[in-house]
Image (cartoon, grey):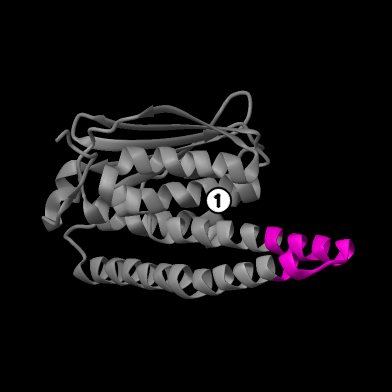
Amino acid sequence: MNAAERPTKPSAKPNALANHLAAAREEERERIARDLHDILGGHLVAIKIEAALLAARLEAEPLRKRARAIQKLLDDALATVGRLTRELRPGILKDFGLGAAIECQAEDFARRTGIACRIVCADHDIQLPQHAAVALFRIFQEALTNVCKHAQASQVAVRLTQEGDEVLLEVSDNGRGLTAADIDKPRAFGLRGMRERLDELGGRLELHPCHPSGTRLRVAIPLAAAEGSGDERCEGAQPQ
C-alpha cells in the first residue's frame, strides 16, 4: 500500500480526551460565530446606516459617489461576516442534516472561488450522531480549502453516500494531483487534522489519483464507531 492509500489507524477504544477537545473546539467556534454576528455584524450595520444618511445629505456628486462606495464596501463586509458565521456555526447541519449542509457548502464554495462544484450524490437520509456529522462536515470544508489553495483545479465532484455499515464522502478534483512527498509532509494540506478527526471515529482516509489529472479524497466512517457516544443524531428534516 502506498502513502496515498494509507488509511488512518482506528483507535482501539474511544478517546475521551480527543472527544472532549473536539467538543471544546466546536464550542469555541460557536462563540466566535456569535461574536462575529452580534458584535462585528452589528457595528457594520450601524456604520452602513450612517453612511446612507451621509450620502442623502451630501450635495456634491463626487462626495455622494464616495459615500455610496463606502456602502458597497460595507455590504461586502457584511456578506463576508455572514459567510464566516455560517462556516463556523453551520446551523443547516443541525436543522436539515449532513446532506443539505454539504450541498450548501459546495454552492457557497463555487460562488466564492469560481471553481465548479458538482454534487454527484448527497444522501439526505444519512443519520449520524451530531459529533460525527460535524467531524465529517469539517473534513469536507478542509478538503475544499485544499482544492482552492493547492490543486489548481477548475472542477470538483462531491459524493456523500451510505454503503453498508459505512458513511462515505468522496471529493474529486481535476487539478495537478498530489505526490507522495506532498502527502508525507508533517502537516500536509490539512491531512493531519482530517486523520485526527477520523481516528476519534475509527474512520479512514484514502487519496487516489484521478485520470487524466487530479486527486480523489475518500473518507469512510463506520456507523458502529460513530454511534458509540450515543449523542443526538444529525439527520435531515423529517416531514411534519
Any magenta on residue 69? yes
Name the residue at 52% across, 44% down.
108
> What span is in magenta?
54-72
158 over 186 or under it: above or below: above
Q: Is residue 42 left or right of residue 56?
A: left
User: Percent position (x, y) of residue 124?
Assistant: 28, 33
Identity, as a three-letter code, of the amino acid under mark 1:
Thr
Q: Is residue 211 left or right of residue 129?
A: right
Name the residue at 60% across, 68% down.
49
User: Percent position (x, y) of residue 182?
Assistant: 60, 50
State the residue in front, 174 or 24.
Answer: 24
State the residue in front, 204 or 143.
Answer: 143
Q: Is residue 161 left or right of residue 54?
A: left
129 over 13 or under it: above or below: above
Q: Is residue 103 left or right of residue 67?
A: left
Name the residue at 36% across, 59% down.
196
* The C terminus: image quadrant: top left
Q: Principal SS element in the magenta part?
A: helix
* The N terminus: image quadrant: top left
Residue named by callout 1: 145
On the question of residue 168 being in view, the answer is yes
On the question of residue 218 being in view, the answer is no
Any magenta on residue 78? no
State the residue in front, 141 or 60.
Answer: 60
68 over 158 or under it: above or below: below
User: Percent position (x, y) of residue 11?
Assistant: 23, 57
